[in-house]
Amino acid sequence: MDQRSPTVYRTKSWQNRRRVVTVLGGAGLVLVGYLLGRWQDTPADPVVTPQAAVTTSAATPEATSAEPDASPSPTPPAGAAPYPVLQAESATELAGVETQATEDEGGGQNIGWVNRDDHLRFDNFDFGAVPATQVRLRLASGSGISGRVQVRLDSRDAAPVGEVSVSDTGGWQSWRTGTAVLQPVSGVHTVFVTFTANDGGEFVNLNWLQFVH
């Protein structure tokens, strides 16, 4: 019986192994190719590129300041300011009266020894466009004689535009303020302050007077 030589057997066996290796190698290449194809077909995860943060700030309006109104503010009518105080001893004319130191507030002088038909005169007093409607008089009396202090315009004999009654205040330096209602007076006038009483005799002292709108 012929027996094959070991060389021939080994040759065929090596060829068989080579075929197996070749088949396996081919199958491996196919598998690798398949896997490679799948990997290429798989969509890549999106790459998120961080965007630069854009900060938007609301526009800040510029601070504005109110401009002052250029139009002039309304001015008060001429003569609307308070009238000055007329000191009795400073009158343009003092007829029949005398002056003395006063004990009234503010000091200074007052007129005294006032009898009926005496008078004071203030020249060129400007009442302005807004009429005066009252006059305040600072009075004192230590006499039992009742009388009146009257305001006249432009003439000592003109009709009074206002008057205030005088009675005993408790002393010749016990001062009180009397108020007389006036007929409305405006413009420039000579002001006469006259004194009248039913009985003769000194009956009043006067420190000052002031007109009121």
Image: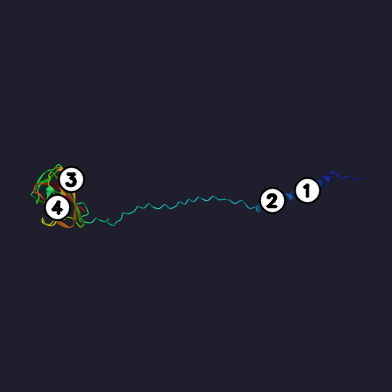
Do residues under tags 4 and 3 come within 8 Å of each other at their CB atoms? no
- Identify which amino acid the numbered label 3 is placed on: Arg
The label nearer to you, 1 versus 2, is 2
* Model colouring: rainbow
Dot 1 amino acid type: Val
- The residue drawn where x is 84% and y is 43% is 6
N-terminal of the pair, mark 1 or mark 2, is 1
Mark 2, mark 4: which one is toward the viewer? 4
Give residue 69's quadrant in the image. bottom left
Residue ID for mark 1: 20
Instruction: Tell me the kind of residue under disc 2.
Output: Leu
Residue hosting label 4: 150
Marks 3 and 1, Cα distance to the nearest angstrom?
A: 145 Å
Amino acid at circle 4: Gln
Q: Name the secondary structure under disc 1.
A: helix
Could you tell me which residue is drawn at 72 percent across and 50 percent down? 31
Q: Which one is earlier in the sequence, the residue at label 2 or at label 3?
A: 2
Q: Which mark is residue 35?
A: 2
Q: Residue at x 84, y 45 (%)?
A: 9
Of the image marks 3 and 1, the number of the one nearer the N terminus: 1
| Residue 93 seen anywhere in this rendered image of the structure | no
Q: Percent x, y for residue 72?
A: 27, 56
Residue placed furthest toward the right:
1
Frontmost residue, 114 versus 10: 114
- Which residue position holds label 3? 176
* SS type, badge 4: strand
